[in-house]
Image (tube, helix red, strand yellow):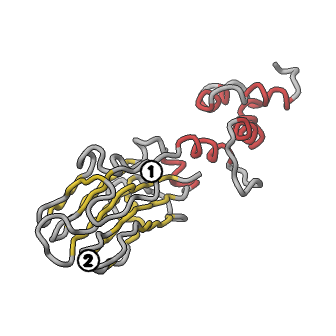
Amino acid sequence: MESLPEAVLIRILASIPAVELVLVCRLVCCHWKNLVDGAALWILKCQQEGLTRADSDAEDWQNFYFLSKKRKNLIKNPCGEEDLEHWGEVENGGDGWKIEELPGDFGKEFPSEEVHKYFVTSYEWCRKAQVIDLRAEGYWEELMDTTQPKIMVRDWYAGRRDAGCLYELCVKLLSENEEVLAEYKSETVTIPQDNDASWTEICHTFSSYGPGVRFVRFEHGGQDTLFWKGWYGVRVTNSSVTVEP
């Protein structure tokens, strides 16, 4: 192995699973450590697995590889397929939260055919939240503190054509002790009665938020503005939180 040209050795190492590269191969010798810590090996692995990026001159290809492979929606049960499972700190104003099938009464189909249900609020404020443990999801402390990858938050909301409603979104980045390190809070969105029931996406990206982020707290909710008994308030679905490469 010592006599192999470096380019050949990199090609061999690129065939090894990424976790073994970092935890095993990197410890073999100084030469292998330098190769595993360098960009060339990870650029090759990204090319082999179809992972592309715009800033091709960047040096953190190892982090880019791991973030790309881990990228997923960290919100559990985003569309109500499991009732209110995984949603905590639930506030059930009026008649409380309800899950309905799309498009619902006086509603519209969702832009994606993969979404079949939504949560709907009542005549007093309904709120629900999830707290995401980043370490439990595989985003280690050094990565969050040094690289500070972008954290993308998305949510979708809609009214029904025959009723007005209100909607709010609040997302916080929390420290180990649940101190708020960064926060995004939408305005209170007012949807008038006789609206077209279209689904609207709201999104926010956290970046350069500083060290110490360990949790993401996602909260949304709303109510109707007519105070009709039942479920005439804002509809929400397909919520997402992703850590971007």
Q: Which mark is residue 160?
A: none
- Element type at mark 1: loop
Q: Amino acid at mark 2?
A: Gly
Question: Residue flagged by tag 1: what amino acid is it?
Answer: Glu
Circles 2 and 1: CB distance less than 8 Å? Answer: no
Above-or-below relation of 101 to 188: above
Give how far across and how far down residue 117 sits, in percent: 32, 52
Locate residue 140, reporting x and y percent: 49, 44
Observer-nearest of 47 and 6: 47
In primary-sequence order, the first of circles 2 and 1 is: 1
Is 209 or 153 nearer to us in this picture? 153
Q: 146 left or right of 29?
A: left
Residue appearing at x 57%, y 40% in the figure = 69
Q: Position of residue 8 (x, y in %)?
A: 84, 27
Instruction: Decide: is 74 above or below 182.
Output: above
At x 42%, y 68%, the residue is 200
Pointer 2 local density, CA inside 10 Å: few below 14, some 14–19, many at least 20:
many
Task: Tell me what residue is drawn at x 29 percent, y 52 percent.
Answer: 101
Dot 1, crowdedness within 10 Å: few (<14), some or many (≥20)?
few
Number of callouts = 2
Quadrant location of the N terminus in the rendered image: top right
Place residue 30 in its image quadrant. top right
- Name the secondary structure under disc 2: loop
Residue 166: quarter of image: bottom left
> What residue is shown at x 42% (from left), y 44% (from top)?
135
Looking at the image, the residue that sits furthest to the front is 106
Q: CA distance from mark 2 to mark 1?
A: 26 Å
Give the percent coordinates (x, y) of residue 145: 52, 54
Q: Identify the mark at residue 113; answer none if there is no mark.
A: 1
Among the 4 quarters of the image, the one containing residue 2: top right
| Residue placed under numbered mark 2 in the picture | 164
